[in-house]
Image: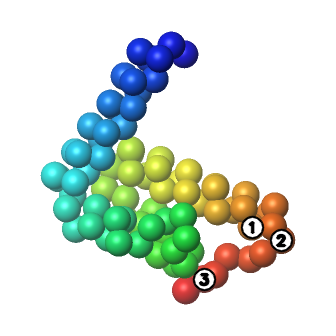
């Protein structure tokens, strides 16, 4: 992918975040306060289950996959809550 294509994709992601922030403020505020990379998995699953649109659902699904991969690689279980 060219640098221009990467910038275009980055702009699209930024636009999707802006849409979620504007249209689903409560969900977005929780997403920002939780930090899915390090949050207890109960919080991550709650955000996944309440995702307000396909973009948010895909993003949270990616966080779950990421966290599952880390758990498998390190041999450390998720912190549930």
Residue 16 appears at what percent x and percent y?
30, 41
Mark 1: secondary structure: helix
**Which label's residue is closer to the chain start, 3 or 1?**
1
Q: Is residue 29 above or below residue 21?
A: below
Which quarter shows the C terminus? bottom right
CB contact under 8 Å: marks 2 and 1:
yes
Quadrant in which residue 67 is drawn: bottom right
Q: Is residue 45 visible?
A: no
Residue 1 appears at what percent x and percent y?
54, 16
Q: Is residue 56 visible?
A: yes
For residue 78, side relative to residue 17 (left or right): right
Q: Is residue 42 above or below residue 11?
A: below
Q: Which residue is mark 1?
A: 71
Q: Which residue is mark 3?
A: 80
**What residue is at 32 percent from the left and 30 percent from the top?**
11
For residue 78, side relative to residue 38 (left or right): right
Q: Which residue is mark 2?
A: 75
Q: Is residue 14 above or below residue 12?
A: below
């Amino acid at each position: 992918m060219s640098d221009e294509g990467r910038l275009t994709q980055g702009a699209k992601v930024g636009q999707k975040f802006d849409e979620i922030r504007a249209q689903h403020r409560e969900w977005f505020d929780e997403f920002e306060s939780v930090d899915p990379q390090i949050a207890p998995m109960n919080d991550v699953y709650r955000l996944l289950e309440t995702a307000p649109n396909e973009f948010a659902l895909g993003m949270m699904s990616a966080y779950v996959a990421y966290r599952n991969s880390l758990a498998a690689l390190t041999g450390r279980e998720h912190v549930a809550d």
